[in-house]
Image (spheres, rainbow, N blue to C red):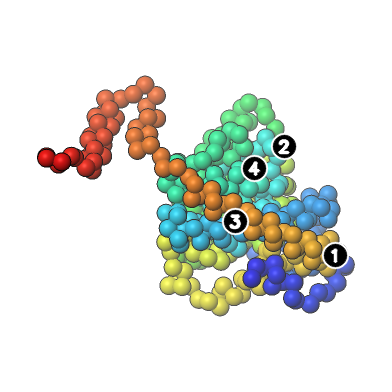
Amino acid sequence: MTVENTAARKPRRSSKRVSAAKKPTSSEPQLVQLLTPEGERVAHPDYDHHVADLGPEELRGLYRDMVLTRRFDAEATALQRQGELGLWASLLGQEAAQIGSGRALRDDDYVFPTYREHGVAWCRGVDPTNLLGMFRGVNHGGWDPSSNNFHLYTIVIGSQTLHATGYAMGVAKDGADSAVIAYFGDGASSQGDVAESFTFSAVYNAPVVFFCQNNQWAISEPTERQTRVPLYQRAQGYGFPGVRVDGNDVLACLAVTRSALERARRGEGPTLVEAFTYRMGAHTTSDDPTRYRHDDERVAWEAKDPILRLRKYLADQGHADEAYFTELDAESDALAKRVREAVRAMPDPDDMAMFEHVYADGHALVDEERAQFAAYQASFTDAPQEGK
């Protein structure tokens, strides 16, 4: 049974009224929220106007993005369990952070992802099947970054923030009014690369948004073992603003990211956005989260599910009916089928192709290694036996 269908059985309550957002106490980190876990729209004085243009069609679009992204992610996880992929990093639970921020981008903005930004890739128009080639081991990234302004996935933790900062510095030098966004997790925030990118972006006033998806766990290390202060407050030490947003609220993520991108385009420098969310599954399919976290923690976050809260809001406001949700279920099934067929049809790469693009003009050592590898491969060929 899909997540959408479980929500359909819950009683609906009218939420026509827009409530005021809860004001945090001085000891609580401020959290920007526009849609509560119960699906109630709340007001925020600084960010409401950034989503004022969203009508029923746009809201349904955000919901569709999250549902299809989750279904694709679930199918990729299943394919890995079936031996079709070597590894997979799931985004389960982080759909709102990725779709909200991804839909805030303009076409001329540039994205530097980690290896989990499947929802952002969807927003940038990257075919989902292209994301799977690297995890199947048939290529090093299945898309042209310049076609979608979406860089290839980065496996090295935190290094993409430096790439994004350098690119943003170039954008500023060129006089363009586009912005750059770098995605990373709470674990990567402990890397020196991230600290260096904060320094350079602040000093050079680079038009970059650092979007940290704080999913509470850096593999098996909880956030409280990585920092003594909320992550968004780190920006203060570098001289630029930081904001914490409800990472399970797609409207808030959209609004906050739009605000940060607009600030960057105006030449006001970087912003750190901490999307406070939760990794519902394993870090990757090689991880077993039951060894280091309790089930009650996951249950508490299931009640904050990003898809369920938007579904309830759409239903309560009369923006979507059961026919719409049923149609979307069918579209999800079709996407999953296409992904399965595409992965199994991927051709194996040429064994010698890895040597072709190491140096532009060739290299004697690479030539030697190519010859050695070719001889090794040939040793597996069955030689004809004498007399046969």
Q: Can you identify the residue that label 2 sits on?
A: 266
Cα–Cα gap, marks 1 and 2: 36 Å
Q: Position of residue 106 (x, y in %)?
A: 70, 39
Quarter of the view holding residue 221: bottom left
Q: Position of residue 90 (x, y in %)?
A: 53, 58
Q: Are marks 4 and 2 in contact (CB under 8 Å)?
A: no
Quarter of the view holding residue 147: top right
Which sits in the foreground, 109 or 239? 109
Q: Are marks 4 and 1 in contact (CB under 8 Å)?
A: no
- Disc 1 or 2, which lies upstream in sequence? 2
Q: Residues within 10 Å of mark 4 (few under 14, many from 20)?
A: few
Q: Tag 3: residue type?
A: Ala
Cα–Cα gap, marks 3 and 4: 17 Å
- For the residues carrying marks 2 and 3, which lies nearer the camera in this image? 3
- For the residues carrying marks 3 and 4, which lies nearer the camera in this image? 3
- Disc 4 or 2, which lies upstream in sequence? 4
Q: Quadrant of the C terminus?
A: top left
- For the residues carrying marks 4 and 1, which lies nearer the camera in this image? 4
Q: Residues within 10 Å of mark 3 (few under 14, many from 20)?
A: some
Disc marking residue 125: 4
- Disc 4 or 1, which lies upstream in sequence? 4
Q: Residues within 10 Å of mark 1 (few under 14, many from 20)?
A: some
The answer to whether any part of residue 363 appears in the image is yes
Q: Can you identify the residue that label 3 sits on?
A: 336
Disc marking residue 380: none
Which sits in the foreground, 350 or 285? 350
Q: Residues within 10 Å of mark 2 (few under 14, many from 20)?
A: few
Cα–Cα gap, marks 4 and 2: 26 Å
Identify the residue shown where x is 45% and y is 55%. 84
- Disc 2 or 3, which lies upstream in sequence? 2
Q: Can you identify the residue that label 1 sits on?
A: 317
